[in-house]
Amino acid sequence: MKKRITLVCLLCLMLLAAVPAHAQKTIYAAGDPNELGVTTFNPLKVELAHDAMSLIYDKLIEWGLDGKFYPGLAQSWSISEDGKTWQMNLKKGVTFHDGSPFNAEVVKWFLAEMAKGPSGYMVGAIESVEITGSHSLTLHFKYPDPNMLFNFSQLFMAVPSMAAAKKYGEAFGIKHVVGSGPYKFHSWSPGNELVLVKNEDYTWGPGLVKNKGPAPIDKVVFRDIKEESTRFLELKTGKIDLVYAVPTMFISKIEKDKKSRIIRLPGDSLYHMVMNTGSAPLDDELVRKGIALAVDQESITKNVFANAGKPAFTYLLASLPESEVPAEDQIRFDLDAAKAALEEAGWTPGSDGIRVNKEGKKLSLKILAKNESSYRRSAEVIQAQLARAGVETKITLMDPSSIRAFYKKGEHQLAVRSYDWENADILEWFLNSKRMGYPNAAMWHDNESDYLMQKAMTRSRTGAERIANFKDYHSYLLSKYVWAPIYLPDTVFAVGSRVILPKDGLDREFMGMGILDWDVK
């Protein structure tokens, strides 16, 4: 009898072994090359945010593609008539990946810690936080901040675990990354890959997604691939499912490939050339004017980016009302005016066409750019354009992961770069005189500029007043030619055939909280 039972048990085990285990669903993504220099995933300290943070952490509020704000960790909120008192009710039942609870105490701690970090300006208007219940609190403001809903919805204000941040100290965000989002930090090999695994306990997705959790996809792997051609080939061969920041040279090829498709979202980037105003001769406004007016934005948009976007004539995204400055304040290509400005500055054409000053010194400058096709080719075209104005330039290419450290030394002169931000306060971030080197690579320090900046950031009582104040600040910066605006690209992603996307997704971050509504074949 025992032998028969044993044989039956063995047959059962054999049958179970023959049944295939649940296939793990994994997405492989080639992350944004601009994020290769990320050094931490700690929202309290990060200056360069990685897209993975939108999966690891939750935010208090989410901002949808429809322009509306949706509940995140904040279930609801109300604002007093004078804008100086906010009542906020938080979601209950939320836990961080380390098992610690999310509550009002965490938010009070988080806002206080945020104020001490590099993104402290985003909560600068908050004077105090009063806990009114385990999951409710009151925010008291020094002055109304009509931009606070936007701030709460940004990746730089993702909420980390208070318990983990206190426990791990400096190692938090590097070896230990703990949020409450739909994915958990698994492993990170800088320069190679970042691995996230599904949070099985996640059931509190934000208001802009249908599925509140858990996510259908088990694992997300971000691979750091610097070479653009390699990223394209990995997508084509199915080794990569998603490519961020697709170079324009590959868009038409991907569109013709039946195994992949192009996804376009509203543009949130602006290419520009920074001028180090602390480095002679760029400390001369007329020289900067001559250089800025010699840059032909329409030619670059056509010849470098195949018209996948539009030329930029200001320092802000065209979709922002603060970018709508008078036509005379915009910076547009004008070679004759460029030459006239350089002449007025005392730089006259030499025998070889390169301008010289009274001492016979050539107008020769260095252009710094990331070693990626869009930046490299932009720098090469600008080099040719400036030559027509009599300005000699030499291009230096640098790895994206090290370029920010170089900015901080202040040894650069011209630099082709870009930013991704959908708010006018990007001007304060990049041009505040308290942040010299990086992010203020222009090394810009001007009293009138600082006054207009503070007026826009802290003295705007309403949204309309904020727009007007930022227009004044924006126009002043344009008149000083601290940057040369170049190009407004489309936001382009490439997606492989395995990925199933929702038809009516509202998430502005392409693979952010919206991944809760994704699946793979």
Image (tube, rainbow, N blue to C red):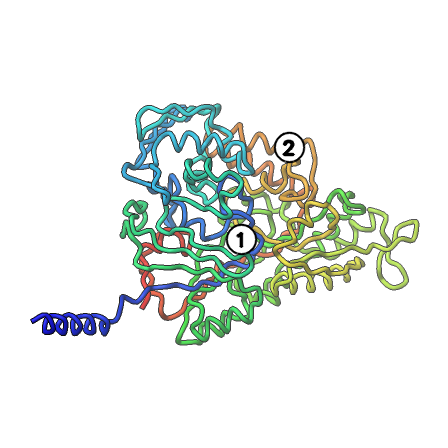
Amino acid type, residue under disc 2 in the picture: Asp
Residue at image point 6% right, 71% down = 1
The alpha-carbon separation of the residues under discs 2 and 1 comes to 24 Å
Q: Residues within 10 Å of mark 2 (few under 14, many from 20)?
A: some
Amino acid type, residue under disc 1 in the picture: Ser
- Residue at the spot of label 2: 450
Q: Quadrant of residue 410?
A: top right
Residue situated in front as seen by the camera: 343 or 11: 11
Q: Position of residue 364 (x, y in %)?
A: 81, 56
Q: Position of residue 417 (x, y in %)?
A: 62, 54
Q: Quadrant of residue 139?
A: top left
Q: Residues within 10 Å of mark 1 (few under 14, many from 20)?
A: some
Q: Position of residue 312 (x, y in %)?
A: 59, 54
- Residue at the spot of label 1: 269
Residue at image point 54% right, 32% down = 116
Q: Is residue 15 left or right of residue 451?
A: left
Furthest toward the front, the residue is 2
